[in-house]
Image: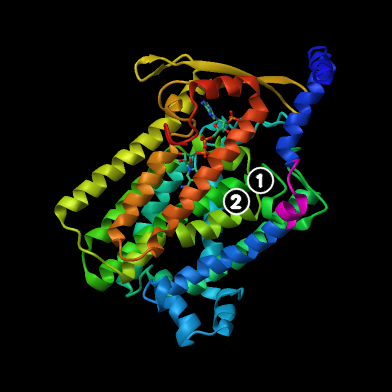
Amino acid sequence: MSDSKHRHKSVLKKTDEELLTDDLTHQLALHTRQGHNKFLSESIIPLMLCFACPFFVRSIVFICDHCHGSIHEFLQRLLFDHTLTLKDVLENFFFFKWHWPSAIIIIGFLIYAIIMTMLLPGDEYQGPITDTGHIPIYRNNGFCYYIVSLIIFTILTVVLKLNNLSPTYIYDQWDAFLSTVSTFAFLLCFCVMIKGKYMPSTNDHRSSSNWLTDFYRGVELYPRIFNIDVKLITNCRYGMLSWALLSVIFCMKTFELYGYTDSALITCILTLVYLTKFFWWESGYMKTIDIIVDRAGFYLCWGCLVWVSGIYTLPSYFLVTHPKQLGFQLTILILTLGLLSIYINYDCDRQKIQVRSTHGKCLIWGKPAKIIRAKYRLLNGKESESILLASGYWVLSRHFHYIPELALAFLWTCPCGFQYILPYFYVIILFILLMHRAHRDDQRCRLKYGDSWIKYCDLTPWKVWPKLY
Ligand code: NDP
């Protein structure tokens, strides 16, 4: 008892310097993940994920292509009929393929993305200040890039069709294409890690003696090569655009095979609207967890290059072999609910960006924004302040925007029907990812903002689902 009293007193008597050290320890904890089981979290899990993720993506394509989209059939063939052996599985799924035509498309696309990002006009804007005091600068040309790319893609499609060719070549070579992207993304992540270790672009880097963890989590927060932001290219200009184009390509393939199919069209339209919204709001995306917290490593960059292409496009890919006619009423219902989900998700993100850009002087749902001014310390010891919005969607729950995101994922998948679980992998994985992300973000903000975050949590007790979680 007396001991705890003594400790309490000593906390009260802490000098400014000690308080600063405490804050820095907090901040450093964010960087070093202190307290975790290091061997498991820094070596075993990264190693397993680096092997398992490419395996997972390729096995899904295999199940779609060779087992009619049925996991049951895949397991039956592997375990009971033995028409598929373990040797086949290992050869098919672990092999790093390099298919030259695919590699040319991928590298050509990447070069296109870099050149257009450099050339297209746009006002400069700032990303959030980092813990070391660095302020990243970007050019706001994402939406222009997206529209120009869609126009070029349309012209290219017409030219190819006139010559009896089609961009659906990518669908026909999908397995080889995806394996090549994966191999390429591995190489890229390795190069970005080496660059981060020996030539970091800013002070926001964390290098360790464990190359596995550095490869998996990444070293740098804001790597730049020739002043081009690597994460902007991998996440937005390649990852998100490839998602849009692949959805169109898979829809075209469905139309080439069966003529007009409403299910493929719904999935394609909702994906395109969602990605149009994404590029419209790209400068907002550059202030989210992917950018301000996650470093450029396998988790983020391989994920945006391969996982997005392979898993996020799964409903459109699946519909090529399992087309459905839904009818007019269902089509309108799914489209309306999907568009509503996109709007709510956008509006949540907009409220957060608006309250910060107006320093809290704005209306949220017709009333003055309710805000908490949350102070925190940068790693260099300087004090900084952020605004936490505690009204609008942001008082319903601390990550309310994840609900319309999940609803949308379900809505563009449900045209696949409910006979197979496979196309729902995106929804399931997104659910796990977002719940974990909400938890991760909560821990981060608690460490960053301390009492101010607790005050916000008192006003908004739910992490994601009001009254549930
Ligand atoms: P947020 O945009 O919610 O970013 C979280 C950060 O916002 C926090 O770390 C904190 O950062 C700040 N913040 C937290 N609470 C408040 C508040 N009350 N007021 C103001 N700022 C606050 O998270 P995400 O990056 O996860 O999501 C961004 C968008 O991307 C969402 O629309 C989401 O649905 C979507 N998304 C899509 C995914 C997909 O795969 N389809 C995956 C993940 C996200 P700070 O340090 O600045 O205070």
Residue at the (61%, 20%) spot, across then down: 452
| Closer to the camera in the image, 318 or 361 | 318
The relative height of residue 134 versus residue 87 in the rendered view (above or below) is above
Which element carries disc 2, helix, strand or loop?
A: helix
Marks 2,1: beta carbons within 8 A:
yes
Looking at the image, residue 244 sits to the left or right of residue 286; the answer is left
Q: Quadrant of the N terminus?
A: top right
Give residue 300's mark.
2
Q: Which region shows up in magenta?
A: 34-43
Q: How many marks?
A: 2
Q: Residue furthest front?
A: 1
Compared with 68, 375 (above or below) is above
Say which amino acid is labelled 2.
Answer: Leu
Which of the 4 image quadrants contains residue 81? bottom left
Q: Amino acid at mark 1?
A: Arg
Question: Does residue 144 appear left or right of residue 372 in this picture?
Answer: left
Residue that appears at 72% across and 26% down: 378
Q: Is residue 65 visible?
A: yes
Q: Residue furthest left?
A: 328
Q: Is residue 362 left or right of residue 98?
A: left
Sequence-wise, the earlier of marks 2 and 1 is: 1
- Residue beneath disc 1: 295
184 in magenta: no
Alpha carbon distance from label 2 to label 1: 7 Å
Q: Helix or strand or loop: what does disc 1 sit on? A: loop
Judge whether residue 39 is colored magenta. yes
- x and y, in percent, of residue 48 in the image: 66, 62
Q: Position of residue 40 (x, y in %)?
A: 73, 55
Query: Against 104, is 413 above or below?
Result: above
* Near-viewer residue (47 or 295): 47
SS majority, magenta: helix
